[in-house]
Amino acid sequence: MRGIKIIFWVIWRVWFYVLMAIPILIMFPFLLASILTESGYPYFFKMARIWAKIILFGMGFYYKIEKEKELEPGKSYMFVANHTSMADIMLMLVTVKNPFVFVGKKELVKIPLFGFFYKRTCILVDRKSSKSRQAVFERAQQRINQGLSICIFPEGGVPDDESILLDSFKDGAFRLAIAHQIPIVPIIFGDNKKRFSYTFFSGSPGIMRVKVNQKIEMLGKTSSNKKEIRETVRQIILDQIIAFDKKG
């Protein structure tokens, strides 16, 4: 029985990467055309949402999204969420309709096909380089000025210890939101760790619950409020993770 499960996990995990590649290959000319200019990004974003839905559906994941309040079309936000799975990227794309740009680690550029578009559409950061972190602020400013939103997973990565519900938050998302005076929207993924964690022999098809909290306004906030805002947002996300766990 154990051997059958291992075979299932291997095939299922490989299928995930096949699913990542197939829509990209089919849409490649259109995806390429949409990234030739920055003004084409909203079209790229629409195709990215289709790509994400295909992957989630193909993996046997079905999502249930609860929103405390609808987002305003055309308004820029800072989206922050807990990070436990590669599927977080896809679930974020299907959850949010407002075009946004991920701020993410440069290592994902190495993934074939995906990395090609990731490098050209996301804001990449080398967390070991202060120069890279400063460049993120400048690039984010350009994207916000274009009417786009920003998405950051503030844990800065996935905790090595999977027993940790939520790691400590880095400052980047909150510094950006305060500097550009854009609202923060906490988003909580309730099931991604058990559905598709980074542990290879784990996971299964099933539900992925999402909670989109009300925005937290940054108007009038300054750098002196950064720590308070960071911990408030972290507590909101942690409380909801615990609530999801209690519901099972």
Image (cartoon, grey):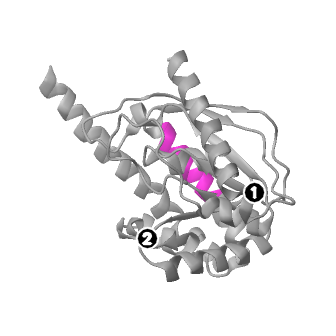
User: Would residue 209 be seen by someone viewing this image from the given angle?
Assistant: no
Please determine whether, in this image, residue 69 is positioned above or below residue 123: above
Left or right? Give the position of 70 relative to 29: right
- Residue 184, given in percent of the width and then of the height, sits at 73, 52
What residue sits right under mark 2 in the picture? Answer: 106
Query: What is the magenta segment's predominant secondary structure?
Result: helix
Please determine whether, in this image, residue 95 is positioned above or below residue 74: above
Q: In which quarter of the image is residue 46?
A: bottom right
* Image disc number at residue 77: 1
Left or right? Give the position of 243 relative to 105: right
Q: Which of marks 1 and 2 is nearer the N terminus?
A: 1
Please determine whether, in this image, residue 55 is positioned above or below residue 140: above
Query: Element at badge 1?
Result: loop
> What residue type is disc 1 on?
Tyr
The Cα–Cα distance between marks 1 and 2, rounded to whole angstroms, is 23 Å
- Residue 137, given in percent of the width and then of the height, sits at 64, 75
- Residue 244, given in percent of the width and then of the height, sits at 55, 24
Please determine whether, in this image, residue 150 is positioned above or below residue 15: below
Q: Give the range drawn in magenta.
A: 46-57
Q: Residue at coordinates 75% horizontally, 54% vertically from top-left?
A: 98
> What residue type is disc 2 on?
Lys
Q: Residue at coordinates 49% horizontally, 48% vertically from top-left?
A: 168
Left or right? Give the position of 67 relative to 107: right
Query: Element at badge 2?
Result: helix
Which residue appears farthest toward the front when viewing the image?
Answer: 224
Quarter holding the N terminus? top left
- Residue 27, given in percent of the width and then of the height, sits at 54, 63
The residue carrying pointer 1 sits among few (fewer than 14), some (14 to 19) or many (20 or more) residues within 10 Å by Cα, namely many
Q: Residue at coordinates 72% horizontally, 65% vertically from top-left?
A: 223
The residue carrying pointer 2 sits among few (fewer than 14), some (14 to 19) or many (20 or more) residues within 10 Å by Cα, namely some
User: Would residue 42 be seen by someone viewing this image from the given angle?
Assistant: yes
